Image (tube, helix red, strand yellow):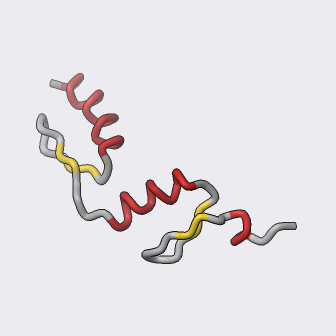
Amino acid sequence: MASEDSVRKFKCKKCGSRFKYQKRLDKHDEIAHNKKKEKCRACGEEFHSEDDLRKHKKVCTERI
């Protein structure tokens, strides 16, 4: 049986967290280590990623 570290081969250089997929590591880095936030122009709510803001905008614009 493979060890957990061999399955989670993508390691964050900033904190040592490990991930099974590169995409998860990229998302982790964006959220955990990127202090920049994306802001919704309609309501002012802030998000760690453009993807989260894009999802929010669909709901936010429906409310307006």
Instruction: Say whether residue 34 is left or right of residue 13.
Output: left
Residue 24 drawn at (x, y percent): 52, 54
Residue 32 drawn at (x, y percent): 38, 65
Q: Nearer the viewer, residue 17 or 40?
A: 17
Q: Nearer the viewer, residue 40 or 63?
A: 40
Residue at position x 35%, y 41% from top? Answer: 51
Q: Nearer the viewer, residue 41 or 10?
A: 10
Residue 42 drawn at (x, y percent): 12, 34
Instruction: Say whether residue 44 is left or right of residue 4.
Output: left
Figure quadrant of the N terminus:
bottom right
- Quarter of the image holding residue 57? top left
Q: Residue furthest right?
A: 1
Determine whether 47 is above or below 17 in the image: above
Determine whether 56 is above or below 61 in the image: below
Residue at position x 55%, y 55% from top? Answer: 22
Instruction: Say whether residue 9 is left or right of residue 40.
Output: right
Q: Residue furthest bottom?
A: 15
Figure quadrant of the C terminus:
top left
Residue at position x 27%, y 50% from top? Answer: 47
- Quarter of the image holding residue 54? top left
